[in-house]
Image (tube, rainbow, N blue to C red):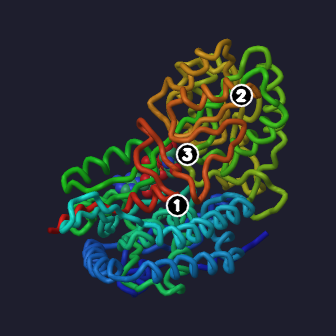
Amino acid sequence: MSQAYETSLALYIDGERIGAAGRRTHTVINPATGRALGELPLATPADLDRALDTAARGYRIWRARSAQERSSVLAGAARLLRERIDKIAAIATLEEGKTLIEARGELMMAANLFDFYSAEVFRVYGRVLVRPAGMLSRVVKEPVGPVAAFCPWNFPIGNPARKLGAAIGAGCSIIIKPPEEAPGSAIEVLNCLLDAGLPKEVATCVFGVPDQVSRHLLASPVIRKVSFTGSVAVGKHLMKLAADGVKRTTMELGGHGPVLVFDDADLGRALDLLVPHKFRNCGQVCVSPTRFYIQEGIYDRFVNEFADRAGKLAVGSGLEASNQVGPMANPRRPEAVESFVADAVKRGARVAAGGERGGGSAAAGFFFRPTVLCDVPLDARVMNEEPFGPIALMRPFKTFDEAIEQANRLPYGLAAYCFTENGRRALLLGDAIESGMVGINTTMIGGADSPFGGVKDSGHGSEDGPEGLEACMVLKAIHQA
Ligand code: NAD
């Protein structure tokens, strides 16, 4: 199936679309075919200075506007996103690989979030303190200032929407650097906001060499907040750069999601939820379930059934409706997953499904088969580092305490899942797991109204929910006599 890549790759600064002419470029690749989709211009230092100047002006303009105006832009953009779903979802599938159905779901989540923020902007309340007559003390919330936001390639629509929506809702200006590998989706999200009436100075979009862009922007006193989604290593690096300017940070870093399945769980329901959730976006999801700890009485049954279902998933181009799993997003991912599998097998793990590249009709695509490894030793690299790929790791456990110890053994703490029909145990699990988000008998751990974020090395701060808006605001106490 062929599909046109209908987007215009450009930087967007101060209302100007800057194309590839005269600039270094990055070739955007379709991961299902390995073929080029287009040339993306990369920002020069002068472009970045112009972006900073625009963001400073944009902040002055936008913070003075009413909540009604911010709400109307966000609600309008939500409507436009839904109207343009066919076009934008196809762009996301072409540049990132995920199936069209997943891309459409991602777009709907972005639209829902814009709608949520469009209402939430009216509820940014402060406080009036109790003081003697003749004195007024109030605590108000103000936008933090211009935001620099860095997005990863795995949610090319949803992640830019999260960062744009929160900053714009709070009254900030924003410079966004979407991923060079999947840039068109973010450009289209921004277009929806501009077409809904966002002043041209408020949101700026740049691409470049990631480290050069982040160093340049974070060195500027104009930027007051940094929002990053990506790997732990890059997050730590950006936090150090942000510290020099005492800039606030929101860090959505990696995860290594534990799944605890107890022997009283509804196994059919657990499998129905966990198999598609594991292989969504070919496992390239920070909240992906990764380490499956299964109580010993049901271990063999669960592993066999999970592997059987994983082996039957149709792998191929995300544009074809019959496929359930698309390619990985770039050639680095199958390479990394292959090396994780080889290391685990060398240390004694058994391959119950997949374990190799394959799928898709085009030999050049970055496909990897849904993979299940069982009896994986704790010292295998994949049990300790985020695989970010289609690998489910299985290990048996005996007791509740052992399960909790295993779930909490890594420095990550983003998403965790538990399956049990015992209410008391479910309550204790919710309390005992060190994780920003916990799903008990469900894999639905987010929503426009719910904070999304991790603890420990998985980062700090929240996106989505009222907390996402608050993360772009600061407090001021004003005492008046
Ligand atoms: P990477 O660490 O090189 O890059 C991750 C993301 O950070 C990319 O979008 C990249 O453009 C950006 N980035 C890298 N260096 C940067 C810098 N100095 N300043 C600003 N942005 C920078 O790795 P990768 O190969 O692209 O992705 C693989 C790893 O990234 C995965 O193993 C996973 O741990 C992590 N990742 C996490 C998420 C998430 O949702 N938390 C998303 C994508 C990737």
Residue at mark 1 to residue at mark 3: CA–CA distance: 12 Å
Q: Residue at x 31, y 51 (%)?
A: 238
Question: Residue 79, position in %: x, y?
Answer: 64, 79
Residue, far left: 481
**Horizontal placement of 24 versus 379: left or right?**
left
The type of residue carrying mark 2 is: Gly
Q: Which residue is mark 3?
A: 286
Residue 409 position in % (x across, y down)? 50, 23
Q: Quadrant of residue 395?
A: top right
Q: Quadrant of residue 32?
A: bottom right
Q: Report if the beta carbon of the residue with label 1 is closer than 8 angstroms to ligand 1.
A: yes
Q: Looking at the picture, which amino acid does disc 1 mark?
A: Asn
| Badge 1 element | helix
Q: Which residue corresponds to mark 2?
A: 423
The residue at label 3 has a CB less than 8 Å from ligand 1: yes
Classify 10 Å Cα crowding around label 2: few (below 14), some (14-19), many (20 and above): few
In the image: residue 96, left or right of residue 434: right
| Marks 2 and 1, the one that precedes in the sequence | 1
Question: Which numbered dot is residue 159?
Answer: 1
Of the two numbered discs 1 and 3 on the same chain, state the one appearing first in sequence. 1
Alpha carbon separation for disc pair 2 and 1 = 35 Å
- Residue 278's place in the image compared with 142, above or below, is above
Instruction: Give the residue displayed 35% in from the left and 64% down from the top.
Output: 148
Residue kind at label 3, given as amino acid type: Cys
